[in-house]
Image (cartoon, grey):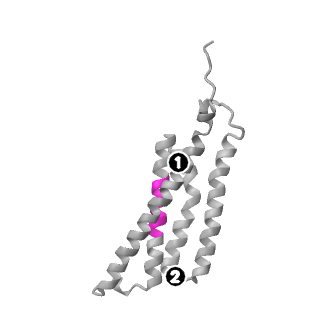
Amino acid sequence: MGHRMRKTPEMQDYDLHVTTGALVIGVLGGLGIVIYGESLLGDIQGTGDSHPGNLANWQVDMGAACMGTAAFIVIFFLLELLGHKSKAHAWRATWPWLPLVGLTALASVIHFPVYVVILMCALDVGWAFYKTWAGRRASNPRGKVTNSTK
């Protein structure tokens, strides 16, 4: 029989580093889109010659937040896909973050008090972060070398 390769500590931590890096880059990309969205929607609101000119300030803010969360999810999915080369893995890492887009989209249509939106987003982010990392532990609880991790 041939020599079996064992995972080195660097290989075992690869999942953690890829997901952490993807989250950080996704958040930075999402923040950039929030800033761009605020500027874009603010300019549209300032023209006043079309229907978007009727947007309230809270709609502009939440619309930009919705754009930013959608950009975060797309960036996170693509980076997970590039890092792990598996659409299923990327989807498992990304799906817990999808309610954040729905929540910000709903908040851009219906006016909720700001503290409710912040609380709901914080709860969703905590849940999504937990689900993202729980999936890592459940699939390979002790970092054992399996056929799928060779």
Q: Of all residues shown, which one is farthest toward the left?
A: 49
Q: Which of marks 2 and 1 is nearer the N terminus?
A: 1
| Magenta stretch contains residue 109 | no
Percent coordinates x, y for residue 4 in the rendering:
62, 20
Q: In which quarter of the image is the C terminus?
A: top right
What SS does tag 1 mark?
helix
What SS does tag 2 mark?
loop
The residue indicated by pointer 2 is 110
Magenta stretch: dominant secondary structure: helix
Q: Of all residues shown, which one is farthest toward the front?
A: 10
Mark 2 and mark 1 in contact? Answer it, CB < 8 Å.
Answer: no
Q: What stretch is highlighted in magenta?
A: 66-76
Q: Is residue 9 above or below residue 81?
A: above
The residue indicated by pointer 1 is 90
Q: What residue type is labelled 2?
A: Ile
Q: Which amino acid does label 1 sit on?
A: Ala
Q: Nearer the viewer, residue 117 or 14?
A: 14
Percent coordinates x, y for residue 67 in the rendering:
44, 68
